[in-house]
Image (cartoon, rainbow, N blue to C red):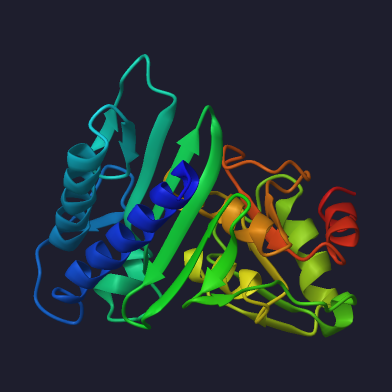
Amino acid sequence: MNKIEEYYQFMVETAFNAGRLTLGYFQAKFQMEFKSDRTPVTEADRKAEEFIRGAIEKKYPRHAILGEEWGSKEYPDSTFRWIIDPIDGTKSFIRGVPLFGTLLALEIEGEVQAGAAYFPALDEMVSAATGLGCFWNGRLARVSTVDRLESAFLTCTTFQNLDIGEKGPSFDRLRERTYFQAGWGDAYGYALVATGRVEIMLDPTMAIWDAGPLLPILREAGGYFGDWKGHQTIYGNEGLATNPLLLPEILQMLNP
């Protein structure tokens, strides 16, 4: 087993176990509060991130960590950084909607090389590592081969911030051309693209931990994840995923 396989197996196991932990709180009573940006955080978020951090610190004690709830743990000489979102889709979680997930990614020398997205209420795992492929519950996953916008399914997380600059008109153009539009949001929308069930997923704003595992997942599934300009990155503060057949026309519509 090479090192990337070792990291990948550890990642999938850890994301799975942390996701199962969150199920103990789902559709039950739990403590919740709002952060300064008015986004919710629950004890399930914090417990899941604590679990993941503990597993990493035990297995890889000199690796850096960035998590949504507990911030950064840096090692200046480390070329490895784990990126954690314990519950992506907390707003869904607090309302009892099953489209939330536990996200975990590994960045090596500044490039995300492996990622896992586990959706515990649906028991779906979508994961990938460079050179190993993308897997959906153990089966190889690929983006769809739909090559016309008129046949494409489009989804997004939220309509907030779509009126900033050109984003509103750009989104409207794309919405008008596509066959079907839905709000299957947060990381689950990107998992749908990676597994060929949806053609386009986009977000007007996105944090690093929201995006962490999505680049290797989409890349290994044969698709694109990055910003609205065509850069494959988790640092674009926005997200777009699609298949390579639709990407050129989508980028042209988003950047008139």
Q: Relative to residue 7, is residue 36 drawn left or right?
A: left
Residue at 27% x, 42% y is: 36
Judge whether 93 appears above or below 110 on screen.
Answer: below
Judge by depth and name the residue closer to the eye, 166 or 153. 153
Q: Relative to residue 21, is residue 177 drawn left or right?
A: right
Judge by depth and name the residue closer to the eye, 129 or 75. 129
x and y percentages locating residue 12 in the rendered image: 37, 61
Judge whether 146 appears above or below 15 on screen.
Answer: below
- How many marks on residues? 0
x and y percentages locating residue 125 in the rendered image: 43, 72
Residue 157, visible in the rendered structure:
yes
Judge whether 227 appears above or below 72 on screen.
Answer: below
Residue at 32% x, 81% y is: 121
Q: Relative to residue 200, is residue 94 drawn left or right?
A: left
Q: Relative to residue 140, is residue 66 drawn left or right?
A: left
Residue at 85% x, 48% y is: 255
Residue 186, visible in the rendered structure:
no
